[in-house]
Amino acid sequence: MTGPSSTGLSPVDGNADWSVSTPAAEGLRAGTLIDLVNRIRGGEYGAVTSLLIARHDKLVLEEYFNGWSADQTHTTQSVSKSVTSLLAGMAVDRGLLSIDAPVTSFFPQYAPIANLDDRKRAMTVRHLLMMETGLDWSEATYEGSPLDRMNTCGCDWLRFVLDWPMRESPGTRWEYVSGGTIVLGGIVASVVGQPLYQFAHEQLDAPLAIRNSTWVVSALENGVTHAGGGLRLRPRDMLKVGQLVLNGGNWRGVQVVSERWIRESTAPLLTTGQTFGTTAPASYGYLWWRLPDGVIAAIGRWGQWIFIVPSADLVMSATGEVDANFLSAPTALYRSVLPSVIR
């Protein structure tokens, strides 16, 4: 990609990835977006590394900052969870998975499971999807958390989570449990008969022409995929995931995941209390967030975001490098990008 043009925005390169257009041609106020991009370039938004916008299924803005470029893959952190939700939906669509099945039923090889009681037996796939596991698990502070311990244990991640003690019955409350998404990935892998990363490459990457994606995989023989935060994608491919959701699971005429699953998984099923810099609390579906103005979001640490705005036929992705600027992307969305839309 060449440098910024006289308009203040970098030219968007058209290729097989995306049809391209301009903000003005797709009903966005270019001046508002130029002002936003210049503020990011000037450091006002901190360590943002990319900002991309598509409207009407066309890429209209593609900017990289702080030394990043279009062909580099970027950590997505917990955006990986939302992608895992899509993969789970594909297994459901194929009749291979019921989300009301008990979690422990998928892992007979792990018997005896530690701390097994009626509460753990009652935990279902749906509880994993909705972060209502009942596990005695907190990630409010990462250092020393169960997630930190799991990531550094050098052990079997699935056993680590399956053996973890319960605090209460599943469905009692919403509690962010990344380990539950790793177990969900293990369940999807077991029912489709291949590692989760391989299933993702074949069933998501191939139809969307996603290039060079990678997943963190455990070094142990069972090779568990880190479904909770281990996916790396190019920002253009993050935007494709958002467009797939906006299109009801369809990508260029191919129904990659059912519209029913997209509708069900992105519905605002419960309120979390998280606000992400907005006035109204966020809701949660099946590993997807719902923000004010009907915005669907995938959210990752250090400022990784995908926003889907059905009312504006718009998708935005952003990446970042530090937690200090975690809220830069939603601030940009609500202060600049949505106000730029010409209704």
Image (tube, grey):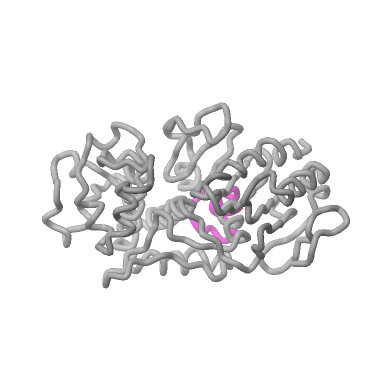
Queried whether the magenta region covers residue 85, the answer comes back as: no
Task: Give percent across and percent down for residue 184.
Answer: 33, 53
As rendered, which of 216 and 254 lies closer to the eye?
A: 216
Q: Magenta span covers which residues? A: 243-259
Relative to residue 24, is residue 76 drawn left or right? left
The image quadrant of residue 335 is top right
Q: Kindly identify the residue that appears in the image at 28 percent across and 70 percent down.
A: 220
**Furthest residue in direction top, as rendered:** 279
Residue at image location 64% in from the left, 49% down from the top: 316
Left or right: 289 as drawn, with respect to 337: left
Question: Residue 202: x percent and y percent?
Answer: 46, 69
User: For the point 38% across and 60% down, which residue is it?
Assistant: 226
Point out residue 45 in the picture as x, y percentages from the top left corner: 66, 45
The answer to which of 164 and 45 lies nearer the viewer is 45
Residue 251 colored in magenta in the image = yes
Tell me: 1 left or right of 121: right
